[in-house]
Amino acid sequence: MQGRFECPIPLPLRLLIAIAFLVLAVATRPSLAQDEPPNDQAPNQDAHPKIAAVIEFSSDIHSLSEQYLYRKLEEARKLGAEVTVIEIDSPGGDVEATLRIAERLRNLPWAETVAYVPREALSGAALFSLGCDQILMAPQAVIGDAGPIFLDKDFLFKHASEKVRSHLARQVRDLAEAKGRPPALAEAMVDMNLVVYEVRNDQTGDTAWMSDAEIASSDTPDAWEKIRPVLESRKDHFLELNGKRAVELGLANGTVEGRDDLKEQFPDVEKWIQLKWGRLDTTIMVMNQPIVTGLMFVVGLIALYFEFAAPGLGIGGVVSLICFGLFFWSRFLGGTAEWLDIILFITGFGLLFVELFLIPGFGVWGLAGGLLILIAVITASQPFLVPRTQQELGELTETLTMLMISIGVFALVAGVMTRRLGSIPGLRRLQLQPPANVLEADVPADSLTETMIDGVCVRVGDVGVAESQLRPAGRIRIGHNYVDVVSDGTFVEPEEKVEVINVRGNRIVVRRVG
């Protein structure tokens, strides 16, 4: 007779510990969105050749592309790049992600940052270009037109409220001032009613580009003489400039005809490195799609259910670990998951463990655990907690729809597995079977037909009703008496009839009738 080593730690607890270690291993990855440590210094120029890294950024701006840029910046830093060129070809995107990128580039301590625009940097792309030390553009490339818009309930794009525009205008002015660019021109990108003038100071002879409000608030408003308005900032138009005009107005530092011309602007750079969109970036993008997320969620839950139905940390547990681990891994690198989501997820599984195996029945522990897991999945799937815009409300609706469909599919598959596990080819041998042969060999025959438990006589052949779920352990009611039993390996739902098929001391084995 073959023996088997039995782990003293219950299976669900082992599985929970394994999930916790896997998820925490993912969570301990350093966040690429954080500022670099203040002690990071540029490489010693005397010891190493000067290196420049070119990062291609040619997509809409959202949390995934934001994290892509941060990953490439981290690669450039590790390679020792002292000049980081971001090649921008983007129509813009999410405002919050845009401003985070702009702030990151403005405060980058270890390299000179250059925004290179070969074709277009519109909307948010124009704004985060302002965070770079230099802006170089092709002569006919365009930059600007960054007015904030939103998708309303009628699915029509409309301009944001005055409150949103005012807040954004201040942030854009701060970006421009930090890099020595005309704040009024930067503000005109987001304010369609702002008219900017070329002005001259009669006292000093200096020229500048200012709005009426700036002139009125200056120390010597009477000294500024308006020469001409900037045509591109006329009323009802967001400022949009081509490369040549941007250089004339001081928003861009120069024009270049291509990458070769770009490299000539940095004659002291000895080595150029190209950082492109790679397989890792594609994998993260794909795994953050709702349909892929829903599939991972369904497979992970089904695998976990299968592991409980066929005890032993086998294929079900491994697949479940992989699915949930990949989910949080993709969310961390995608920039939507945080430590709180990990804590909620693990706590939720812990409460479910307590409900399933320590406190029978489905009550407050199970509800709380399920709710925490649901909240963890939702918050890990989006970069906000409470939706504040129509777009964020749409993202939340999409996430909830994905979860509801996934849970529905899981419930359907779990129901089929509960009833058909023993008849599925290849899986029947994984089902628990009553150890009849062992019992008959080890115990006298009369003890196999009846037993006394707490004064209640239970006999083989007695029929009762499941009081709780048998997974496989649980409680049944025989007449007016309640006894603890184990099923023959299948799950039994409450109120289903069961028959006692074997007894051994205090161990009673039952099976579903019919």
Image (spheres, rainbow, N blue to C red):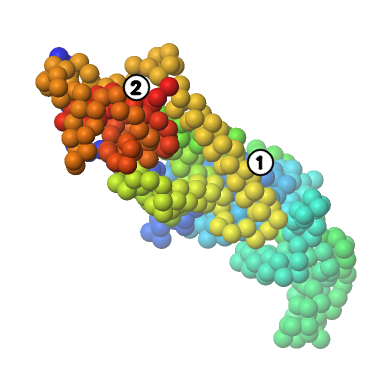
Would you call the spot at circle 2 few (<14 residues within 10 Å), some (14-19), or many (20 or more)? some
Q: Who's the residue at 15% across and 25% down the image? A: 447
Which of these two is toward me, 33 or 378?
378
Q: Position of residue 467 (x, y in %)?
A: 37, 40
Q: Amino acid at mark 2?
A: Gln
Residue identified by numbered label 2: 431
Alpha-carbon span between mark 1 and mark 2: 53 Å
Q: Secondary structure at mark 2?
A: loop
Q: Amino acid at mark 1?
A: Ser
Decide if residue 249 is on the left or right side of residue 24.
right
Q: Position of residue 282 (x, y in %)?
A: 56, 33
Decide if residue 471 is on the left or right side of residue 268.
left
Tag of residue 428: none
Judged by depth in the image, the label closer to the viewer, 1 or 2, is: 2
Q: Earlier in the sequence, mark 1 or mark 2?
A: 1
Q: Quadrant of the C terminus?
A: top left
How many numbered badges does the structure rendering display? 2
Q: Secondary structure at mark 1?
A: loop
Whether the residues at callouts 1 and 2 have beta carbons within 8 Å, the answer is: no
Image: 38 above or below 25: below
Q: Position of residue 187 (x, y in %)?
A: 74, 66
Tag of residue 58: 1
Residue 14 showing in the rendered view: no
Q: Who's the residue at 77% across and 55% down the image? A: 152
Q: Position of residue 419 (x, y in %)?
A: 46, 25
Residue lying farthest front?
Answer: 479
Which of the 4 image quarters holds residue 37? bottom left
Q: Quadrant of the N terminus?
A: top left
Q: Who's the residue at 27% across and 38% down the image? A: 484
Q: Who's the residue at 73% across and 53% down the image? A: 123
Which of these two is toward me, 187 or 311?
311
Residue 461 showing in the rendered view: yes
